[in-house]
């Protein structure tokens, strides 16, 4: 079945700046004009960090305003728009079944920068676009800056659109700034994605953004550590806010002047952020080279005269008001999103070989099913598999998960209804690491060949050579390493395998301030998401239903005990002492929840009539039945207890091959979100700890503090990340050199 659309947008939807914002505006404008569109996402070569899809583009897909296009879908469109030349500089890694009557490459960046350095190979861009979509593309510069960069010899047969493909803006979403006089201090502002090249040189920055705190406040949206690295010392009158996707119009409305200067080596192709400032009616001050783009809508000067210009407009209220009105009218006349349908019609009429066809069928064919292969190491519990189940269970139906693990907790994946494969660790086989890695490489290679995943998600601290060698044979598979924080120093050796993955995702850690391990220095290179839970706290059974299911009376004070499998850290003595202390109170019931992979379940002894040993997975589903808990401080258990508001005494597993559980428990103790007992140091204090745990007012305080934590489940974010990347065309590597 062939899907007929008016426009297919081809873009690296991960761009966080003006390119994605401009694209989102065009998609929305097309929808309002009744045009049917689709978005084919590309993973291009410019972004090396694991950026997610731009949230505005994701929203347009989620709301059905544009269709997600899979490269295997047969699509015919009146127009194909390739947004940004760099995303097609390399040949796509797969055949694309999308064709169009007109192919446009929107040049969002100059061919040559301010220092005359070529930014992309235009001949390759055109050649690969032609090969992918079957027609010679038309080049559409976004501005005169980009157009002038094309004055060098163009590739043979290149056609450049007569009009600029300038950015558009929905003026209804950018209301006029309130008409108020400039006060003191004068508020200067700017916003941009966090990039040092977007800022002026060290020599001129204080001329543009003065440090005089009595006269000026400088508000910056898009600040970060990079500013301190560029300028060493930052003025105290700078209000620095992190980069944000939304709330920009509100930010701009608080300013008196918008001042934008950048590094002399940078060539600004258009200046989306400038257009947004003009749209709200600000007085915008720019360096002179922007004048061909914005005309009399802005004011132009050199950096040394910025304060002089500000004074002129501050002293003349009517001049200030007139300039703001001129800025707004400029946007409404030349950059309003309502102009978009006419632009599309002109281009199709000019370049289409045949008259554009109006789509008739409203049926959208289902997306092809894609496979995702989850792989995890052995561990000593169910944590890695549970975390991957949390992600897998949140994938859409057209993504099919399969599991491969070295853990006996594989049965959790099987019981959840997923295909699962067991890969024994060399420790279980008494094999040498070298021989085992050779065998592992063969097994993983065959497994990938069998499952044929588009995404491979690896969850472990340890990375094995057998895994990386096998994955290297599948360059088109998108490879993700999900690694938890709080590493020990001896685990640093595994960082050498980071380059073997296309993206690294770090599930968030409530105790992040206590993480000074090997991965802490690389947080800028990874995608950090909120803590991951298999179940959201709200998905748990109600207290009455959970107690009924467990056969627990309403009046009992229930303490759940979960101290892990004991496979690598002996908890026998601390378990006995703590349970005995709890049972000293006659109204208590100890519900000991044993690990699903514990080997001695049948032989476990209870310590009294009010001590029950049960096997529950996931036990968190029943946790509203508990009044308190005694638990190890592994990633999953710790975040379940705290985010579930369960008053918990944490007993960290401090084995050398574990993460730094003691740091999590120390955070809980110091912040009032739980208590800490260390096996080798605090056991004589067990009575005091249990007394606090069973104190009703103490428990209420912990529960209240836990409930105040602002949290969303990182599992859903990772699942969306996998969904987006499962259907991306890859141009981030040269397939001719595979």
Image: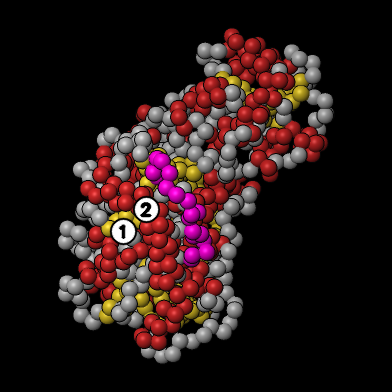
Q: Position of residue 521 (x, y in %)?
A: 35, 35
Q: Position of residue 264 (x, y in %)?
A: 21, 53
> Which SS type dominates the magenta stretch?
loop
| Left or right of residue 499: residue 576 | right
Please say whether residue 69 is visible from this viewpoint. Answer: no
Q: Which residue appears at 63% of the width and 43% of the height? A: 535
> Which residue lies under the disc numbered 1?
299
Q: Position of residue 154 (x, y in %)?
A: 20, 75
Q: From this viewpoint, which residue is outermost toward the top?
A: 684
**Mark nearer the N terminus (2 vs 1):** 1
| Left or right of residue 681: residue 136 | left
Closer to the camera in the image, 464 or 554 = 554
Q: Which residue appears at 22% of the width and 42% of the height? A: 202
Q: Which residues are magenta?
A: 170-187
Q: Which mark is residue 427?
A: none
Q: Which residue appears at 66% of the width and 37% of the height? A: 620
Q: How many marks?
A: 2
In the picture shown, does residue 328 fall above or below 628? below
Q: Position of residue 415 (x, y in %)?
A: 64, 48
Mark 1 lies on a secondary structure that is strand
Q: From this viewpoint, which residue is outermost toward the bottom?
A: 354
Local crowd at mark 1 within 10 Å, few (<14), some, or many (≥20)? many
> Which residue lies under the disc numbered 2?
316
| Left or right of residue 257: residue 31 | right
Q: Nearer the viewer, mark 2 or mark 1?
A: 2
Please say whether residue 172 is visible from this viewpoint. Answer: yes
In the picture shown, does residue 656 fall above or below 359? above
- Please report contact status of discs 2 and 1: CB closer than 8 Å, yes or no: no
Is residue 172 located in the magenta-colored stretch of the structure? yes
């Amino acid at each position: 079945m062939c899907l007929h659309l008016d426009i297919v947008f081809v873009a690296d939807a991960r761009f966080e700046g003006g390119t994605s914002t401009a694209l989102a505006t065009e998609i929305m404008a097309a929808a309002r004009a009744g045009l049917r569109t689709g978005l084919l996402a590309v993973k291009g070569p410019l972004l090396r960090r694991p950026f997610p899809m731009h949230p505005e583009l994701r929203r347009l897909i989620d709301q059905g305003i544009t269709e997600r296009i899979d490269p295997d879908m047969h699509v015919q469109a009146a127009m194909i728009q390739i947004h940004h030349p760099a995303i097609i500089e390399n040949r796509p890694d797969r055949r694309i079944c999308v064709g169009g009557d007109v192919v446009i490459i929107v040049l969002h960046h100059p061919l040559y920068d301010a220092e005359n350095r070529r930014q992309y190979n235009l001949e390759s861009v055109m050649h690969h676009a032609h090969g992918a979509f079957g027609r010679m593309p038309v080049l559409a510069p976004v501005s005169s800056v980009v157009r002038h960069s094309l004055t060098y010899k163009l590739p043979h047969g290149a056609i450049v659109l007569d009009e600029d493909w300038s950015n558009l803006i929905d003026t209804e979403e950018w209301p006029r700034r309130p008409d108020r006089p400039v006060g003191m201090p004068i508020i200067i502002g700017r916003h941009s994605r966090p990039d040092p090249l977007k800022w002026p040189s060290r020599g001129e920055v204080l001329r543009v953004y003065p440090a005089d705190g009595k006269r000026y406040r400088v508000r910056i949206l898009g600040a970060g550590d990079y500013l301190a690295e560029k300028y060493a010392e930052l003025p105290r009158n700078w209000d620095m806010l992190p980069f944000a996707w939304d709330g920009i119009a509100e930010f701009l409305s608080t300013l008196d002047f918008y001042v934008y200067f950048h590094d002399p080596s940078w060539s600004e192709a258009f200046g989306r952020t400038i257009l947004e400032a003009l749209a709200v009616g600000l007085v915008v001050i720019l360096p002179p080279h922007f004048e061909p783009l914005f005309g009399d809508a802005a004011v132009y000067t050199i950096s040394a005269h910025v304060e002089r210009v500000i004074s002129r407009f501050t002293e003349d209220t009517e001049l200030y008001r007139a300039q703001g009105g001129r800025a707004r009218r400029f946007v409404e006349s030349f950059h309003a999103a309502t102009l978009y349908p006419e632009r599309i019609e002109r281009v199709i009429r000019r370049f289409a070989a045949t008259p554009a066809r109006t789509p008739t069928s409203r049926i959208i064919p289902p997306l092809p099913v894609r496979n995702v292969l989850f792989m995890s190491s052995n561990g000593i519990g169910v944590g890695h598999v549970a975390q991957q189940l949390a992600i897998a269970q949140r994938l859409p139906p057209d993504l099919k998960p399969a599991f491969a693990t070295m853990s006996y907790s594989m049965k959790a994946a099987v019981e959840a209804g997923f295909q699962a494969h067991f890969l024994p660790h060399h420790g279980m086989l008494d094999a040498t690491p070298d021989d085992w890695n050779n065998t592992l490489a063969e097994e993983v290679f065959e497994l990938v060949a069998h499952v044929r995943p588009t995404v491979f998600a690896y969850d472990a601290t340890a990375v094995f050579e057998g895994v990386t060698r096998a994955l290297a044979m599948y360059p088109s598979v998108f490879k993700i390493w999900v690694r938890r924080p709080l590493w020990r120093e001896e685990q640093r050796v595994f960082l050498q395998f980071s380059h073997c993955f296309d993206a690294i995702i770090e599930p968030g850690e409530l105790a992040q301030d206590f993480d000074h391990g090997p991965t802490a220095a690389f947080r800028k290179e990874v995608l950090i998401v909120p803590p991951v839970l298999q179940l959201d706290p709200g998905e748990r059974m109600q207290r009455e239903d959970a107690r009924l299911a467990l056969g627990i009376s309403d009046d009992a004070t229930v303490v759940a005990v979960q101290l892990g499998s004991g496979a690598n850290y002996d908890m026998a003595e601390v378990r006995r002492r703590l349970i005995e202390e709890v049972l000293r109170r006659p109204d208590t019931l100890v519900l000991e929840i044993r690990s699903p992979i514990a080997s001695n379940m049948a032989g476990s002894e209870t310590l009294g009539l009010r001590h029950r040993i049960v096997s529950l997975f996931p036990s968190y589903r029943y946790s509203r039945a508990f009044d308190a808990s005694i638990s190890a401080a592994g990633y999953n258990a710790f975040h379940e207890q705290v985010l579930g508001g369960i008053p918990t005494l944490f007993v960290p597993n401090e084995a050398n091959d574990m993460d730094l559980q003691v740091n999590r428990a120390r955070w809980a103790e110091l912040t009032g979100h739980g208590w800490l007992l260390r096996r080798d140091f605090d056991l004589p204090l067990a009575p005091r700890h249990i007394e606090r745990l069973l104190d009703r007012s103490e428990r209420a305080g912990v529960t209240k503090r836990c409930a105040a934590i602002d949290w969303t489940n990182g599992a859903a974010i990772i699942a969306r990340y996998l969904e987006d990347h499962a259907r991306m065309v890859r141009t981030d590597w040269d397939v001719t050199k595979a």
